[in-house]
Amino acid sequence: MNDDQLVIVALSGGVDSAVSALLLRDAGYHVQCLHMTNWEDDGYCESAKDFHDARRVCEHLGLTLHRVNFSDNYKQQVFTHFLDEYRLGRTPNPDILCNKEIKFGVLWKYAKRLGGQWLATGHYAQALSRCNKTELHKALDESKDQSYFLHTLQSDNLTNVLFPLGLKTKSEVRKIALKSLLPVAEKKDSTGICFIGERPFAEFISQYFQDKPGKIIDHAGRLLGTHKGLQYFTLGQRQGLGIGGLANNSGEAWYVAEKNIETNDLIVAQGKNHSSLYKNWLKASKLSWVNGPPAGWKDGLAIKFQAKTRYRQPDQSCTAITAGNGIVDVQFENPQKAITPGQSVVFYQDTRCLGGAIIDEAKMCELSLSEVG
C-alpha cells in the first residue's frame, strides 16, 4: 500500500478504533476518520457522547474527522430484520447484519466518496492475502476475536480492508492508548446491542411488541408459572423466569429449553446440564462463503469443519453437507448447549474463517448426516 493512499478509519468513539487510527498514522499512512451514527439518541444510545469522544480523539491525533448519519439505513436494513426475527420467536444477531450492510456496505461506499482507497476498523480480526484472494482469519487474541461477526463478508469486501488490531491483544491496545494519552484510553468497552444501551432488554423490546401471556411448563407438561411473551426469552436463558426453587426440590436453576410458537408455551428444564438443553444437529440457511465453497461442497460431499454457534465459543468439531439453495445440515461431534435459531453457525479451518449460515432449527439426532439426508 502506498503512503499517499487515503485510509478512512471507522472511528466509533471507543478505544479500539482510536488505537487503530493512531497505529496507522504512526506507520506513515494518510489517515482520515469517519464517525457514523446508526441510532438517534433516545436517552440510552449515547451517539452524541460517542461523537464527542471521536472528535476529541481526532483533535488529539491531528486527524480530519467526517461524520455521517446512517440511522435510516440501519433501521431499514438491520433493525427491521431484528424485529421480524423476534416475531418468529428467533434470536437474531444484529451485529452480523450491521457489518455486512452498514460498516462494510454503505459506510465503505461513503468512504470511497471521500476519496478513501482503504477502510480500517477496530475489529479484532485479520484480512490476509493468499493466492490472489483475501482471506478472513482470527485475531491473535482469540479471546477478543470478532471473525464470527464478520463471516458474511466476501473476499471482495475484504480486499481494501485493514484490521490494525489483528495482531494485538486487548491489554496491548489499552497500554498503547494510555501511553499515547488518548482521551478514550480508559473508556469501558461497549457491550450488548448498540441501540439497547444499558437498559434491560425486556424494557426495550416491550416498545415494539404487545405482551402475549402464556404458560411456563417443563417437558412433562407441568405448569410452573406464566410469562408475558416469548419475545422476552432466548434459549439457554436463566434470568427472569421467576420460577426459582420450584419442583423437584433440587435447588438447581431453571433454563429456557424451547419456545413453542404455536402454543405460546415457554418450555424450561432444571439444571444447567439438563439433556434437553443440548443438541448435536442443526439446519441453517442463507449460507455464504468468504472465498467460495470448499472443494467437494457442490458435489454433496460431507466435509469436516470446526464451527461455533455463538461468539467466543471454543471451536467445535462437526461435519456439514449442503442441502441445496443455501441450506446446510451440520452434525457436531459432541452435543452443543443452547443452539439458538436466528444466531449463526460459523465454519473455520484452523484460524481461517470460511463462512457461515443462520440457524433455523436444532435437535438431537442419533443418525449420521448421510442417514438423515
Image (spheres, helix red, strand yellow):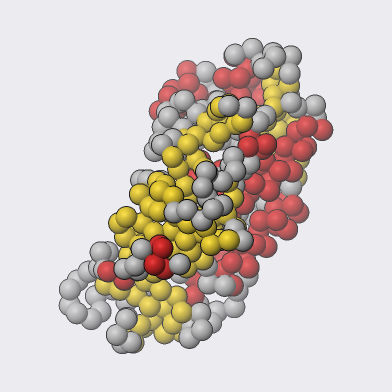
Q: Quadrant of the C terminus?
A: bottom left
- x then y, percent, for residue 64: 73, 24
Viewer-proximal residue among 122 and 337: 337
Q: Quadrant of residue 160?
A: top right
Q: Position of residue 252 (x, y in %)?
A: 22, 69
The residue drawn where x is 53% and y is 62% is 323
Residue 259 in picture, x, y percent from top left? 45, 75
Residue plotted at (30% across, 56% down): 334
Q: Residue furthest left?
A: 249
In the shown orientation, is residue 230 left or right of residue 46? left
Tell me where residue 76 sits by quadrant. bottom right
Horizontal side of 220 relative to 74 (left or right) equals left
Q: Is residue 290 visible?
A: yes
Residue 189 picture location, percent across and down: 49, 40
Q: Residue sitting at 75 percent across and 27 percent down? A: 116
**Residue displayed at 19% across by 79% down:** 248
Quarter placement of the N terminus? top right
Inspect this view and state whether residue 198 appears: no
Location of residue 151 with respect to 338 vertically, above or below = above
